[in-house]
Image: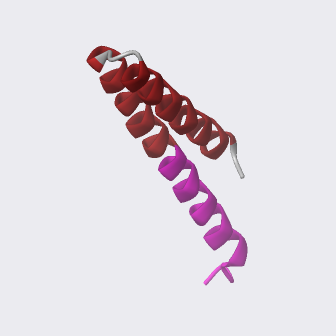
Amino acid sequence: MNKDQVKGSAKEVAGKIQQGVGRAIDSPDQQVKGMGKQIEGNAQKNFGNLKEAVKDAAKHSDGK
């Protein structure tokens, strides 16, 4: 795992919590912010996944 995968996953979790708190306190603003944080986290995690895939492909490449 790389730092983008870890940070992205953490942002996703934080966003889910924020969205849940927003629901609990009936705050649409907090719900939207939580969803936005989840989207941002997912994008960062996917970027990290892509970096890992490129690194793995380069490592397994035979150089031809």
Q: Is residue 57 left or right of residue 22?
A: right
Compare residues 8 and 53 and report the one nearer the observer: 8
Q: Is residue 28 left or right of residue 50?
A: left
Q: Quadrant of the C terminus?
A: bottom right
Q: Reply above or below: 63 against 31.
A: below
- Most extreme residue toward the left is 28
Q: Is residue 40 left or right of residue 58?
A: left
Q: Residue at x 33, y 17 (%)?
A: 26
Quadrant location of residue 35?
top left
Quadrant location of residue 20?
top left
- What secondary structure prevails in the magenta region? helix
User: Can residue 57 be found in the magenta stretch?
Assistant: yes
Q: Residue at x 34, y 25 (%)?
A: 31
Residue 55: give x, y in percent of width and height. Answer: 65, 62
Compare residues 11 and 30 and report the one nearer the observer: 30
Compare residues 12 and 44 and report the one nearer the observer: 12
Residue 53: give x, y in percent of width and height. Answer: 59, 65
Q: Reply above or below: 17 against 22.
A: below
Q: Residue at x 43, y 36 (%)?
A: 38
Q: Residue at x 42, y 22 (%)?
A: 24
Q: Reply above or below: 47 against 21.
A: below
Q: Reply above or below: 26 against 46.
A: above
Compare residues 8 and 18 and report the one nearer the observer: 18
Residue segment shown in magenta: 45-64
How many numbered discs sit on the rendered protein? 0
Residue 5: give x, y in percent of width and height. Answer: 62, 46
Please, which colouring scheme is shown? secondary structure
User: Can residue 54 be found in the magenta stretch?
Assistant: yes
